[in-house]
Image (tube, rainbow, N blue to C red):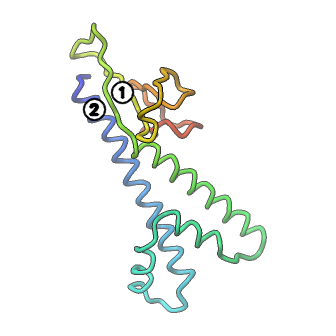
Amino acid sequence: MTFFNDEIEVASYLGRLVMSFNDLEVAIGGALMRVLLKEDDEYVGAVFVANLNFSQRFAVMRALTIEPPKIREEFELLLNQAKDINGRRNNYLHAEYSPILTDDYTPNQPVTFLHQRLRDYSKKLHRHDEGDFQIHPATKIPRSSQTSRRMPRH
């Protein structure tokens, strides 16, 4: 791949992340809208939910009284998963992606990108997966991960 193609691949992952997270936010907003409204007035519900960010929607959903306890447990599990996904999303979107080109770089070799969170910009750079920063070859971004610093593959 060329540098341009590798950059497009990273942008594609970020775009897919944005679109998928939007689906999650819409689903949470729709659920919240239906739970809070007594009547089927989607316009009022949409206006209300549209003015809440993810954290506010999450707080409202967490405050709901849900019975029986088994359903509440499942609901809490889903909410916690959504919160984790939101954190992962923020990690990827509020970051800078810089190509790292070595002295022996040739145009046809894969490019490695530095993923650096903006809030960590002034911190010392660590070249390993356990630190605040990560370096990923664009062609080797993992399909899934247990860490919040890796982008899902499509």
Frontmost residue, 21 versus 62? 62
Q: Earlier in the sequence, mark 2 or mark 1?
A: 2
Q: In which quarter of the image is residue 147?
A: top right
* Label annotation for residue 46: none
Q: Percent x, y for residue 65? A: 70, 77
Residue 40, percent from left and from top:
47, 89
Q: Nearer the viewer, residue 91 or 123?
A: 123
Tell how many labels: 2
Q: In which quarter of the image is residue 113?
A: top left
Q: How many other residues sit within 10 Å of disc 1, few (<14), some (14-19) or many (≥20)?
A: many
Q: In the displayed image of the protein, which residue is found farthest to the bottom?
A: 39
Q: In this view, does 148 lie to the left or right of 107?
A: right
Relative to residue 127, is residue 78 drawn left or right? right
Q: Name the residue under label 1.
A: 113
**Outermost top residue:** 104
Q: In this view, does 102 lie to the left or right of 41?
A: left
Q: Quadrant of residue 121?
A: top left
Residue 52, image x and y in percent? 46, 71
Q: Is residue 67 above or below residue 77?
A: below
Residue at x-position 53% and y-position 26%: 129
Between 74 and 106, the one lying in front of the other is 106
Q: Residues within 10 Å of mark 2 (few under 14, many from 20)?
A: some
The residue depicted at 40 percent of the width and 40 percent of the height is 118
Identify the residue position indicated by label 2 in the image: 7
What's under tag 2, amino acid-wise?
Answer: Glu
Q: How far apart are marks 2 and 1 (CA)?
A: 9 Å
Please identify the quadrant where the N terminus is shown: top left
| Residue at the right extreme of this rendering | 69
**Callout 2 touching callout 1 (CB < 8 Å):** yes
Q: Which residue is drawn at 39% across and 80% down?
A: 47
> What kind of residue is marked 1?
Phe
